[in-house]
């Protein structure tokens, strides 16, 4: 299993050589080869618990996100919570929970670029490169912020062909 490390963040989570490092919204050069970084994204919408996840305090963030999810019935309002739970569970190494919430985020029908990107990164971590490429290709088609998705897709395709 991958080793997980966290530091402060703004809106993204980068995966570099098996280690998660929280960084800025664009991939930060945490190694000499920036092309080795994959990036998860939290929702751009402010959701209770997101700041904790972005700060690497996953247990507190997950608890607050679950509380927010319990109090939210609208699919539109649930989508950012589901995306952020996906990120929190991937970052904390709880990959079975991550799979469930990444799938729910995609199924919600909202924030599809973020949802497919995050599930694509999870599939990459799990070694499911075909599924990773498929999700990342979908994310590039449905979203406007494509640079981080395109970088993730390039890395997934490289590993798929390896």
Image (cartoon, rainbow, N blue to C red):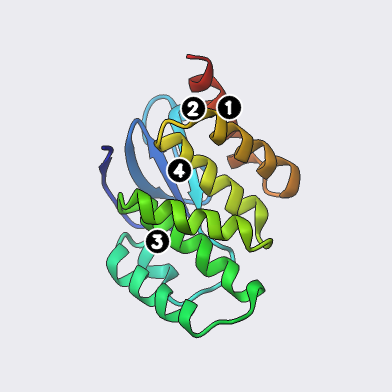
The image's mark for residue 154 is 1
Looking at the image, residue 59 sits to the left or right of residue 47; the answer is left
Q: Measure the alpha-carbon separation of dots 3 and 4.
A: 17 Å
Which residue is label 3 attached to?
54
> Closest to the observer: 142 or 70?
70
Task: Name the quadrant containing residue 130.
Answer: top right
Please tell me the numbered disc located at residue 122: 4
Q: Is residue 33 above or below residue 108?
A: above
Residue in view at x 42 percent, y 49 percent: 23
Closer to the camera: disc 4 or disc 1? 4
Image coordinates of residue 71 in percent, x first then y, are: 50, 85
Residues at marks 3 and 1, CA–CA distance in whole angstroms: 25 Å
Crowd around label 1: few <14 · some 14–19 · many ≥20 (10 Å)? some
Instruction: Provide the residue designation for mark 2.
Output: 35
Which residue extends farthest bottom?
A: 71
Mark 2 residue element: helix
Q: Are marks 2 and 4 in contact (CB under 8 Å)?
A: no
């Amino acid at each position: 299993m991958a080793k997980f490390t966290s530091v402060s963040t703004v809106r993204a989570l980068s995966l570099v050589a098996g280690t998660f490092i929280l960084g800025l919204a664009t991939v930060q050069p945490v190694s000499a080869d920036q092309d080795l970084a994959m990036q998860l994204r939290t929702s751009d919408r402010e959701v209770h618990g997101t700041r904790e996840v972005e700060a690497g305090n996953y247990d507190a963030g997950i608890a607050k996100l679950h509380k927010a999810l319990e109090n939210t019935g609208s699919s539109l309002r649930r989508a950012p919570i589901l995306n952020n739970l996906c990120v929190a569970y991937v970052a904390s190494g709880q990959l079975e929970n991550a799979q469930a919430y990444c799938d729910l985020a995609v199924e919600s029908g909202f924030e599809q670029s973020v949802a497919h990107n995050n599930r694509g990164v999870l599939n990459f971590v799990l070694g499911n490169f075909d599924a990773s490429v498929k999700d990342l290709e979908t994310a590039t088609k449905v979203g406007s912020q494509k640079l981080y998705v395109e970088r993730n897709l390039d890395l997934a395709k490289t590993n798929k062909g390896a």
